[in-house]
Protein backbone atom coordinates (compact mmCIF):
# COMPACT_ATOMS: atom_id res chain seq x y z
CA UNK A 1 0.00 0.00 0.00
CA UNK A 2 1.37 3.39 -0.95
CA UNK A 3 2.32 5.83 1.81
CA UNK A 4 -0.21 8.42 0.54
CA UNK A 5 -3.00 5.84 0.69
CA UNK A 6 -2.07 4.95 4.27
CA UNK A 7 -2.03 8.62 5.24
CA UNK A 8 -5.51 9.19 3.79
CA UNK A 9 -6.83 6.12 5.61
CA UNK A 10 -5.44 7.36 8.92
CA UNK A 11 -6.98 10.79 8.40
CA UNK A 12 -10.38 9.27 7.61
CA UNK A 13 -10.27 7.13 10.76
CA UNK A 14 -9.33 10.13 12.90
CA UNK A 15 -12.16 12.17 11.43
CA UNK A 16 -14.65 9.40 12.14
CA UNK A 17 -13.49 9.35 15.74
CA UNK A 18 -13.31 13.07 16.45
CA UNK A 19 -16.19 14.56 14.41
CA UNK A 20 -18.90 13.13 16.74
CA UNK A 21 -16.93 14.36 19.75
CA UNK A 22 -16.53 17.84 18.30
CA UNK A 23 -20.18 17.95 17.24
CA UNK A 24 -21.29 16.95 20.75
CA UNK A 25 -19.17 19.66 22.31
CA UNK A 26 -20.56 22.30 19.96
CA UNK A 27 -24.13 21.15 20.65
CA UNK A 28 -23.72 21.47 24.41
CA UNK A 29 -22.02 24.83 24.15
CA UNK A 30 -24.76 26.08 21.83
CA UNK A 31 -27.32 25.29 24.51
CA UNK A 32 -25.72 27.18 27.37
CA UNK A 33 -25.28 30.91 27.68
CA UNK A 34 -22.11 31.21 29.71
CA UNK A 35 -20.75 34.12 31.68
CA UNK A 36 -17.29 35.33 30.76
CA UNK A 37 -14.68 32.86 31.95
CA UNK A 38 -17.25 30.21 32.82
CA UNK A 39 -17.09 26.73 31.34
CA UNK A 40 -19.81 24.07 31.20
CA UNK A 41 -19.47 20.82 33.11
CA UNK A 42 -21.19 17.76 31.67
CA UNK A 43 -23.10 15.72 34.20
CA UNK A 44 -24.79 12.43 33.34
CA UNK A 45 -25.88 11.07 36.74
CA UNK A 46 -28.19 12.62 39.30
CA UNK A 47 -26.70 10.25 41.90
CA UNK A 48 -23.29 11.80 41.37
CA UNK A 49 -24.76 15.27 41.77
CA UNK A 50 -26.70 14.48 44.93
CA UNK A 51 -23.67 12.81 46.52
CA UNK A 52 -21.48 15.83 45.78
CA UNK A 53 -22.37 18.25 48.57
CA UNK A 54 -20.51 21.10 46.89
CA UNK A 55 -22.80 20.84 43.88
CA UNK A 56 -26.08 20.48 45.75
CA UNK A 57 -27.93 23.26 47.58
CA UNK A 58 -29.02 21.99 50.95
CA UNK A 59 -32.31 23.26 52.30
CA UNK A 60 -30.53 24.30 55.51
CA UNK A 61 -28.07 26.59 53.74
CA UNK A 62 -28.29 30.24 54.85
CA UNK A 63 -30.21 32.17 52.25
CA UNK A 64 -28.12 35.31 52.69
CA UNK A 65 -25.04 33.75 51.09
CA UNK A 66 -24.48 33.57 47.29
CA UNK A 67 -24.25 29.78 47.46
CA UNK A 68 -24.90 28.88 43.85
CA UNK A 69 -25.14 30.10 40.27
CA UNK A 70 -28.17 29.07 38.24
CA UNK A 71 -27.09 28.48 34.62
CA UNK A 72 -28.61 30.78 32.00
CA UNK A 73 -29.69 29.25 28.68
CA UNK A 74 -31.16 30.78 25.55
CA UNK A 75 -34.96 30.82 25.80
CA UNK A 76 -35.33 29.04 22.49
CA UNK A 77 -33.16 26.16 23.70
CA UNK A 78 -34.44 25.78 27.26
CA UNK A 79 -38.15 26.24 26.50
CA UNK A 80 -38.71 25.06 22.93
CA UNK A 81 -35.81 23.18 21.30
CA UNK A 82 -35.05 20.86 24.22
CA UNK A 83 -34.05 17.76 22.22
CA UNK A 84 -37.14 16.13 23.74
CA UNK A 85 -35.63 15.73 27.23
CA UNK A 86 -38.64 17.61 28.63
CA UNK A 87 -41.53 19.72 27.34
CA UNK A 88 -43.51 22.42 29.06
CA UNK A 89 -47.27 21.93 29.17
CA UNK A 90 -47.09 18.12 29.39
CA UNK A 91 -46.92 15.98 32.55
CA UNK A 92 -43.55 14.19 32.58
CA UNK A 93 -45.27 11.19 34.21
CA UNK A 94 -46.69 10.38 30.77
CA UNK A 95 -43.22 9.21 29.68
CA UNK A 96 -41.96 7.56 32.87
CA UNK A 97 -42.29 3.95 31.77
CA UNK A 98 -41.24 4.31 28.15
CA UNK A 99 -38.39 1.97 27.28
CA UNK A 100 -36.58 4.78 25.49
CA UNK A 101 -36.47 6.81 28.73
CA UNK A 102 -37.36 9.85 26.67
CA UNK A 103 -37.14 12.18 29.65
CA UNK A 104 -34.27 10.53 31.52
CA UNK A 105 -32.54 12.69 34.13
CA UNK A 106 -29.13 11.73 32.77
CA UNK A 107 -30.15 13.03 29.34
CA UNK A 108 -31.43 16.27 30.86
CA UNK A 109 -28.19 16.88 32.75
CA UNK A 110 -26.16 16.11 29.65
CA UNK A 111 -28.18 18.46 27.45
CA UNK A 112 -28.64 21.16 30.08
CA UNK A 113 -25.87 20.91 32.70
CA UNK A 114 -26.61 22.51 36.06
CA UNK A 115 -25.13 22.39 39.54
CA UNK A 116 -28.09 24.35 40.95
CA UNK A 117 -29.96 21.49 42.60
CA UNK A 118 -32.09 22.09 45.67
CA UNK A 119 -32.59 19.10 47.97
CA UNK A 120 -35.91 19.75 49.71
CA UNK A 121 -35.90 16.63 51.88
CA UNK A 122 -34.66 13.05 51.88
CA UNK A 123 -36.95 12.14 49.00
CA UNK A 124 -37.01 14.99 46.50
CA UNK A 125 -35.10 17.80 44.87
CA UNK A 126 -35.42 20.15 41.91
CA UNK A 127 -33.07 21.29 39.15
CA UNK A 128 -32.93 25.03 38.45
CA UNK A 129 -32.33 26.96 35.24
CA UNK A 130 -32.86 30.45 33.85
CA UNK A 131 -33.50 31.79 30.36
CA UNK A 132 -31.73 34.80 28.91
CA UNK A 133 -35.16 36.48 28.84
CA UNK A 134 -35.68 36.31 32.61
CA UNK A 135 -37.74 33.15 33.17
CA UNK A 136 -36.83 30.51 35.77
CA UNK A 137 -37.43 26.81 35.09
CA UNK A 138 -37.63 23.99 37.64
CA UNK A 139 -37.65 20.21 37.11
CA UNK A 140 -38.75 18.04 40.05
CA UNK A 141 -37.25 14.66 40.98
CA UNK A 142 -38.26 12.08 43.56
CA UNK A 143 -36.52 8.97 44.95
CA UNK A 144 -39.72 7.30 46.09
CA UNK A 145 -41.48 7.75 42.75
CA UNK A 146 -38.76 6.36 40.47
CA UNK A 147 -35.31 6.83 42.04
CA UNK A 148 -35.00 10.23 40.30
CA UNK A 149 -34.62 8.54 36.92
CA UNK A 150 -37.06 10.98 35.28
CA UNK A 151 -38.75 14.20 36.42
CA UNK A 152 -42.25 14.07 37.82
CA UNK A 153 -45.11 16.44 37.06
CA UNK A 154 -44.97 19.45 34.77
CA UNK A 155 -41.81 21.45 34.16
CA UNK A 156 -42.45 24.68 36.10
CA UNK A 157 -41.69 28.03 34.47
CA UNK A 158 -41.95 31.24 36.49
CA UNK A 159 -41.55 34.80 35.31
CA UNK A 160 -43.12 36.47 38.31
CA UNK A 161 -45.06 35.19 41.30
CA UNK A 162 -48.62 36.48 41.04
CA UNK A 163 -51.55 36.24 43.45
CA UNK A 164 -54.64 34.11 43.04
CA UNK A 165 -56.61 37.37 43.07
CA UNK A 166 -55.00 38.27 39.75
CA UNK A 167 -56.83 35.32 38.19
CA UNK A 168 -60.17 35.79 39.98
CA UNK A 169 -61.99 36.91 36.83
CA UNK A 170 -60.78 34.06 34.61
CA UNK A 171 -63.59 31.64 33.73
CA UNK A 172 -64.15 28.53 31.63
CA UNK A 173 -64.34 29.55 27.97
CA UNK A 174 -62.13 32.64 28.26
CA UNK A 175 -59.57 33.27 25.52
CA UNK A 176 -55.91 32.60 26.21
CA UNK A 177 -55.22 36.28 25.52
CA UNK A 178 -56.99 37.15 28.78
CA UNK A 179 -54.63 34.91 30.75
CA UNK A 180 -51.64 36.24 28.80
CA UNK A 181 -52.52 39.74 29.97
CA UNK A 182 -52.16 38.53 33.58
CA UNK A 183 -49.00 36.42 33.22
CA UNK A 184 -46.81 36.60 30.07
CA UNK A 185 -45.48 33.09 30.78
CA UNK A 186 -48.73 32.00 29.08
CA UNK A 187 -47.24 33.11 25.76
CA UNK A 188 -44.50 30.50 26.14
CA UNK A 189 -47.20 27.84 26.34
CA UNK A 190 -49.05 29.29 23.35
CA UNK A 191 -45.87 29.18 21.27
CA UNK A 192 -45.14 25.65 22.43
CA UNK A 193 -48.63 24.35 21.67
CA UNK A 194 -48.77 26.01 18.26
CA UNK A 195 -45.23 25.98 16.87
CA UNK A 196 -43.73 22.88 18.46
CA UNK A 197 -46.73 20.57 19.11
CA UNK A 198 -48.68 21.88 16.07
CA UNK A 199 -51.91 21.42 18.00
CA UNK A 200 -55.36 21.65 16.40
CA UNK A 201 -58.89 21.36 17.75
CA UNK A 202 -59.12 17.58 17.39
CA UNK A 203 -55.79 17.10 19.19
CA UNK A 204 -56.83 19.21 22.17
CA UNK A 205 -60.09 17.26 22.50
CA UNK A 206 -58.24 13.93 22.26
CA UNK A 207 -55.79 14.98 24.95
CA UNK A 208 -58.63 15.89 27.29
CA UNK A 209 -60.36 12.56 26.67
CA UNK A 210 -57.09 10.69 27.33
CA UNK A 211 -56.57 12.53 30.61
CA UNK A 212 -53.53 14.55 29.54
CA UNK A 213 -54.84 17.99 28.48
CA UNK A 214 -52.56 20.80 27.41
CA UNK A 215 -51.82 22.63 30.64
CA UNK A 216 -50.17 25.88 31.66
CA UNK A 217 -48.80 26.08 35.22
CA UNK A 218 -48.71 29.18 37.45
CA UNK A 219 -46.80 29.38 40.71
CA UNK A 220 -48.71 31.81 42.92
CA UNK A 221 -48.16 33.27 46.37
CA UNK A 222 -51.03 31.16 47.70
CA UNK A 223 -50.55 27.89 45.81
CA UNK A 224 -50.28 26.24 42.40
CA UNK A 225 -52.72 27.03 39.56
CA UNK A 226 -53.26 24.75 36.56
CA UNK A 227 -55.20 25.93 33.52
CA UNK A 228 -56.19 23.30 30.97
CA UNK A 229 -56.81 24.34 27.37
CA UNK A 230 -59.02 23.41 24.45
CA UNK A 231 -59.03 24.85 20.94
CA UNK A 232 -62.07 25.93 18.95
CA UNK A 233 -62.16 25.93 15.15
CA UNK A 234 -58.36 25.55 14.96
CA UNK A 235 -58.02 29.21 15.84
CA UNK A 236 -57.46 30.20 19.47
CA UNK A 237 -57.19 28.46 22.81
CA UNK A 238 -59.98 28.58 25.37
CA UNK A 239 -59.90 27.81 29.08
CA UNK A 240 -61.26 24.28 29.53
CA UNK A 241 -60.61 23.77 33.24
CA UNK A 242 -59.10 25.63 36.21
CA UNK A 243 -57.50 23.80 39.14
CA UNK A 244 -55.99 25.49 42.21
CA UNK A 245 -54.29 23.91 45.22
CA UNK A 246 -53.08 25.90 48.20
CA UNK A 247 -50.56 23.21 49.20
CA UNK A 248 -48.74 23.40 45.85
CA UNK A 249 -49.82 19.84 45.07
CA UNK A 250 -51.34 18.27 41.97
CA UNK A 251 -52.43 14.72 41.11
CA UNK A 252 -50.45 13.44 38.13
CA UNK A 253 -51.45 11.04 35.36
CA UNK A 254 -50.43 8.06 37.48
CA UNK A 255 -52.58 9.09 40.42
CA UNK A 256 -49.63 10.29 42.49
CA UNK A 257 -49.52 13.56 44.42
CA UNK A 258 -46.81 15.83 43.02
CA UNK A 259 -45.27 18.54 45.18
CA UNK A 260 -44.37 21.79 43.37
CA UNK A 261 -43.07 23.73 46.37
CA UNK A 262 -40.15 26.04 45.57
CA UNK A 263 -38.18 27.59 48.39
CA UNK A 264 -38.57 31.33 48.71
CA UNK A 265 -34.91 32.00 48.01
CA UNK A 266 -35.11 30.07 44.72
CA UNK A 267 -38.03 32.06 43.30
CA UNK A 268 -37.47 34.90 40.80
CA UNK A 269 -36.83 38.22 42.54
Image: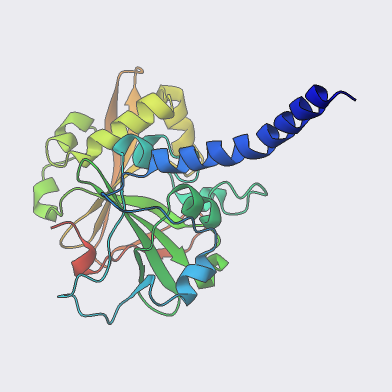
Lateral position of residue 114 relative to residue 105, left or right: left
x and y, in percent, of residue 227 in the image: 29, 44
x and y, in percent, of residue 168 in the image: 11, 48
Task: State which quarter of the image contains the N terminus.
Answer: top right
Residue 132, by quadrant, is: top left
- Closest to the observer, 207 or 140: 140
x and y, in percent, of residue 5 in the image: 81, 23
The residue at 26%/80% (across/down) is 61
Please name the colour scheme applied to the rendered image.
rainbow
- Closest to the observer, 170 or 87: 87
Residue 204, by quadrant, is: top left
Residue 17, by quadrant, is: top right
- Closest to the observer, 125 or 244: 125
- Is residue 89 something that shows in the picture? no
The residue positioned farthest toward the front in the image shown: 3
The residue positioned farthest toward the right in the image shown: 1
Q: In this figure, what is the number of numbered marks?
A: 0
The residue at 31%/39% (across/down) is 74
x and y, in percent, of residue 125 in the image: 40, 69
- On screen, 119 above or below 1? below
The residue at 42%/26% (across/down) is 199
- Closest to the observer, 221 or 99: 99
Amino acid sequence: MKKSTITIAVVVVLLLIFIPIIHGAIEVKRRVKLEEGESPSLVVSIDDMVSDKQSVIEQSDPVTEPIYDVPVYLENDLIYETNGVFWIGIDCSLFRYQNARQMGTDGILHTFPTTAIRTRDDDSCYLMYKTDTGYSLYLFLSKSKNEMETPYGFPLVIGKVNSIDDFKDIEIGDDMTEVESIDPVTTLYRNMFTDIYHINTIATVNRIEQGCPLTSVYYLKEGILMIEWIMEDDTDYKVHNIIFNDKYEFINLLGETDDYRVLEEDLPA
